Image: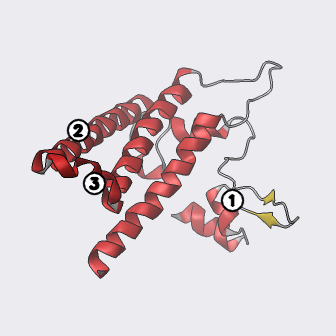
Amino acid sequence: PDWLLAQARSGGSLATLIGLRPMTSLLGNTATARFELPSTDSPWLVAFGAPSKLGRCLSPRTFLAFRVLLALFWTGITIWSMVDHKANDLETAPEFYIYLTNWSLLIEWFYLVSATFVTRMALRNPKRTALDGAPSKTPLFARITYAAQVETYVLSFFVFVLYWAL
């Protein structure tokens, strides 16, 4: 996208482009391993309360409806996968959890359900503030969802590569 190219040309680092802030580790050096959006004027409400530029034609309510449908669809896929695995052999039902593909299915399910919840929370109270009236920092549930999103992208790609490479 144009905004990404403009940021890259202006000398912004990859961590700045994706919204990660540097944090100091125990050794004193800085790292960008913190899953927190910048906390100026509650940007998690913007990040989770509206679709990205790709889905800009959707209203926030339609975006929430799409997330609900996607979470329900993925819940059905997850239940079907568990039932199908158990129906094949009752003695090997616990083996469902030893496969990387099944773990990625569960983590994607967690992300989709939590993203639906975070989107609902962002739309419910668009001017969320702390007790002193200042904009609140990114809440824990939004940071967990953001971390699950990153993990879902990486894990899905990893499973794809392993499936076709092995």
Q: Nearer the viewer, residue 111 or 5?
A: 111
Q: Earlier in the sequence, mark 1 or mark 2?
A: 1
- Between the residue at mark 1 and the residue at mark 2, the CA separation in whole angstroms equals 33 Å
Inspect the image, locate mark 1, and give the three-letter code of the amino acid beneath it.
Answer: Ala
Inspect the image, locate mark 2, and give the three-letter code of the amino acid beneath it.
Answer: Gly
User: Height in image: 105 above or below 129?
Assistant: below
Taking the view exactly as shown, the residue that stands out farthest to the top is 131
At x 29%, y 73%, the residue is 163
* In this rendering, position of residue 93 left or right of residue 32: left
User: Considering the numbered disc 2 on the image, is that residue within a helix, a strand or a loop?
Assistant: helix
Residue 123: percent from the left, percent from the top?
A: 52, 26
At x 21%, y 47%, the residue is 81
Residue 43: percent from the left, percent from the top?
A: 65, 40
Taking the view exactly as shown, the residue that stands out farthest to the left is 88
Kindly identify which residue carries mark 2: 76
Which quarter of the figure has residue 63?
top left
Kindly identify which residue carries mark 1: 33
At x 49%, y 51%, the residue is 149
The numbered disc on residue 87 is none
Mark 2 nearby-residue class (10 Å; few <14, some 14–19, many ≥20): few
Q: Nearer the viewer, mark 1 or mark 3?
A: 3
Kindly identify which residue carries mark 3: 95
User: Considering the numbered disc 1 on the image, is that residue within a helix, a strand or a loop?
Assistant: loop
Residue 3: percent from the left, percent from the top?
A: 59, 61
Q: Earlier in the sequence, mark 1 or mark 3?
A: 1
Confirm or deny contact between disc 1 and disc 3 (CB under 8 A).
Answer: no
Mark 1 nearby-residue class (10 Å; few <14, some 14–19, many ≥20): few
Q: Nearer the viewer, residue 130 or 52?
A: 130
- Between the residue at mark 1 and the residue at mark 3, the CA separation in whole angstroms equals 33 Å
Which quarter of the figure has residue 137?
top right
The quadrant of the image that shows the C terminus is bottom left
